Image (cartoon, rainbow, N blue to C red):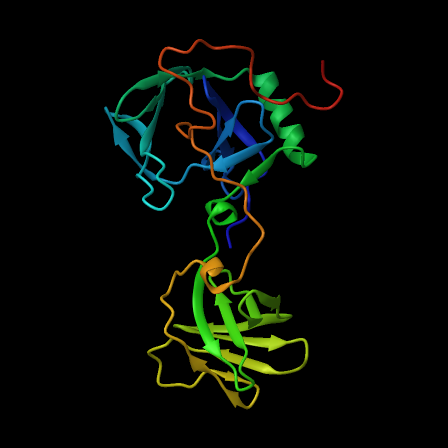
């Protein structure tokens, strides 16, 4: 799993909030992840898209998300040879919003907030809904649900408990666990020739599609924070919106 970046290299300010360009932990001179932080928020969300030129300039293009309905957009930015920002735009299919460089002192405040865990950076995995990978029937009649984050739940509809089991090995569509009770668990893909096992008991795959919503099986999970983009309804600013005071949180003790 990729390590969450810890330091802002530079940031751009838009009417909806800030775009944070993080330092690459292995190559500090380069940009690692890029995050969007809505105004008046202490959460920043990864901008996950294709990095390529647009209008002859640097850009990150985010595709339309069919699952959430979030519209696609592009973040365009460019610097001169002297290091000055020459272009910063958020471009959707309907409009273009211009941005500006964030003051270096405010950027320092952001890094203090990250170090003190006041500002949280959320990867796509952090905010993506957890869906079903496999559903299996146990010999005692209970159902075993394997989720996309590798967690296991056992029980009956509306009455599931999380199984204390840790993944030990992965291979292809197979995942092996060691349960706290001492049992070994092997879950293979539905099309595998190998039988899925709980200890020495065989598990039977149920006809539930991959990627199903756990709630449809009666498994209610804690709600995750919503992944916000510059064009999410919760943060969207109408065309031509003027800049107000910086949306960056102040570091503790800073006026």
Is residue 87 visible in this depiction of the protein? Answer: no
Q: Residue at x 44, y 9 (%)?
A: 242
Q: How many marks?
A: 0
* Residue 174 quadrant: bottom left
Is residue 147 visible in this depiction of the protein? Answer: yes
**x and y, in percent, of residue 137 in the image:** 48, 80
- Residue sitting farthest toward the right: 253
Q: Residue at x 50, y 44 (%)?
A: 123
The quadrant in which the C terminus is found is top right
**x and y, in percent, of residue 107 in the image:** 58, 22
- Residue sitting farthest toward the front: 158
Q: Is residue 73 above or below residue 167?
A: above
* Left or right: residue 253 compared with residue 188: right
Q: Nearer the viewer, residue 152 or 91?
A: 152
Q: Nearer the viewer, residue 236 or 189?
A: 236
* Left or right: residue 139 compared with residue 56: right
Q: Nearer the viewer, residue 46 or 228?
A: 228
**x and y, in percent, of residue 153 in the image:** 56, 68
- Residue sitting farthest toward the bottom: 200
Q: Residue at x 42, y 77 (%)?
A: 188
**x and y, in percent, of residue 193 in the image:** 35, 85
Q: Residue at x 45, y 60 (%)?
A: 216
């Amino acid at each position: 799993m990729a390590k969450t970046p810890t330091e802002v290299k530079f940031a751009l300010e838009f009417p909806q909030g800030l775009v944070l360009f993080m330092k690459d932990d292995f190559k500090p001179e380069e940009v690692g992840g890029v995050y969007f932080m809505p105004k008046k928020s202490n959460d920043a969300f990864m901008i996950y898209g294709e990095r390529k030129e647009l209008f002859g300039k640097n850009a990150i293009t985010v595709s339309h998300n069919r699952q959430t309905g979030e519209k696609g957009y592009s973040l365009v930015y460019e610097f001169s040879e002297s290091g000055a920002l020459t272009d910063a735009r958020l471009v959707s299919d309907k409009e273009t919003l211009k941005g500006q460089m964030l003051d270096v002192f405010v950027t320092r405040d952001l890094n203090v907030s990250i170090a003190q865990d006041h500002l949280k950076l959320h990867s796509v995995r952090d905010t993506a809904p957890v869906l079903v990978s496999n559903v299996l029937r146990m010999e005692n009649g209970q159902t075993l649900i394997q989720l996309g984050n590798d967690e296991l739940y056992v029980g009956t509809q509306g009455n599931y408990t999380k199984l204390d089991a840790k993944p030990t090995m992965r291979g292809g569509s197979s995942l092996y666990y060691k349960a706290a009770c001492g049992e070994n668990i092997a879950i293979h893909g539905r099309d595998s020739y190998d039988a899925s096992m709980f200890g020495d008991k065989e598990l039977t795959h149920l006809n539930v599609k991959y990627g199903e919503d756990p709630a449809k099986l009666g498994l209610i999970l804690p709600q995750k924070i919503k992944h916000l983009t510059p064009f999410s309804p919760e943060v969207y600013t109408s065309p031509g919106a003027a800049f107000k005071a910086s949306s960056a949180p102040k570091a503790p003790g800073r006026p």
